[in-house]
Amino acid sequence: MAEAEELEAVRFDEARNLGAAGGVGAWLEYALTRGLLGTIGRLPDGARRALVSGAARLAMRLDARHREAARSFLRQALGCAHLEKDGDARILQAYRHLFRISLDAAAFDRRVPQATLLEHYRLRTCAGFEEAVRAGRGGVLVTPHVGDWEAAAAALPHLGMTPTYVVARPPRNRYLSEHLLRVRERKGVTVMPRRGGMAQAGTILERGGWIAMLLDQRPSGKHVVAPFFGRPAPCERGAAVLLKRMRVPVLIGANYLTDEPFRYDLRVTRVLQPEELAELSIVELVTLLNREMEALILRHPEQYFWLHDRYRGA
């Protein structure tokens, strides 16, 4: 097989990676968002933290739908006793975390130069990781919405996992989604649109590419039901079918924030070999992936996106 860096990347119809909302109102929203993120991102770290905390408190007060979804999710994952003790603090932290990684994504290229990128990560891996990367067969990285998943994607090309693809759903705002697409491309990452992009996944893996997937949220299409934190939840079916069919290693891990800005704790906690996957049914495989993601979430629950209505439609 050719060296990974010489492999030609699969390209996608760019329109599938762009949101549907355009026009003057969408452009003004985009300009305001870019301006705010750029301005706040250049403030001293202490001032940024204060603004993030204030925005999180306001969002929690106004966003009743996501607040209640988080309350239900936390009750299931951490238990009623925990929710009664500090549930509101945990929900507030979820908003705070979401705002922080949005700001960090806007400032990442300025604060983390490509030439020294890996110096910002502490990499901790398990048995089978180096062999999987060196083999040149490609593979899949599965991670939940914990820590900083955007910064995780930026590290993958530097670890030899190239060409690198991430599956993502674009924001509704067309101008904002185009900007986000360019930001990710500058990191050496090709974005696979969630709508229609998976049709090319087989080609990517056959060419030795790597695909990063976030599989902890409720899918919008065909699904299976499997336990997530002990409660039946709709889960991605197509991804599990792909993992079984393509016979490539599946890495499970997460990239956590640390106390120091733009310094990360990147962990790969398990490598599933194709032989292991072949013995599992689709539901058994999804259940296994859920268990591994649960462990990653519980390692740092304060860095998780609890605001998702995870169990609706089970």
Image (spheres, helix red, strand yellow):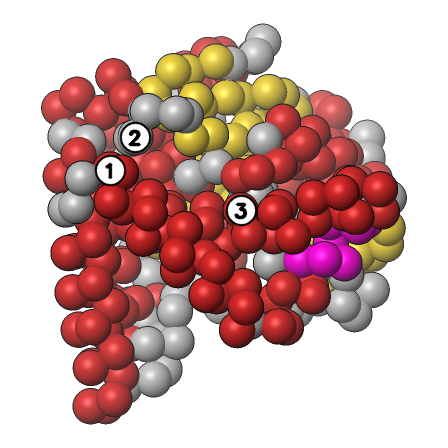
Q: Quadrant of residue 259?
A: top left
Q: Is residue 124 visible?
A: yes
Instruction: Give the distance between the C-alpha atoms of the residues marked 2 and 1, in whole angstroms.
Output: 8 Å
| Residue that carries the numbered disc 2 in the rendered image | 261
| Residue that carries the numbered disc 1 in the rendered image | 45
* Nearer mark to the viewer, of 3 and 2: 3
| Sequence-first tag of 3 and 1 | 1
| Residue that carries the numbered disc 3 in the rendered image | 93
Indicate whether 273 appears above or below 100.
above
- Most common secondary structure along the magenta stretch: helix
Asked if the residue at tag 1 contacts the one at tag 3, i.e. Cβ–Cβ closer than 8 Å, the answer is: no
> Residue at image x 61%, y 67%?
66
Q: Is residue 66 left or right of residue 168?
A: right
Q: Quadrant of residue 145?
A: top right
| Sequence-first tag of 2 and 1 | 1
Give neighbour class at mark 1: few <14, some 14-19, many 20+ (Cα, 10 Å).
Answer: few
Q: Looking at numbered disc 1 in the image, what kind of residue is underneath it?
A: Asp
Instruction: Give the distance between the C-alpha atoms of the residues marked 3 and 2, in whole angstroms.
Output: 17 Å
Q: Quadrant of residue 46?
A: top left
Q: Looking at numbered disc 2 in the image, what kind of residue is underneath it?
A: Pro
SS label for mark 3: helix
Residue 203 is covered by the magenta coloring? no
> Residue at image x 20%, y 53%?
40
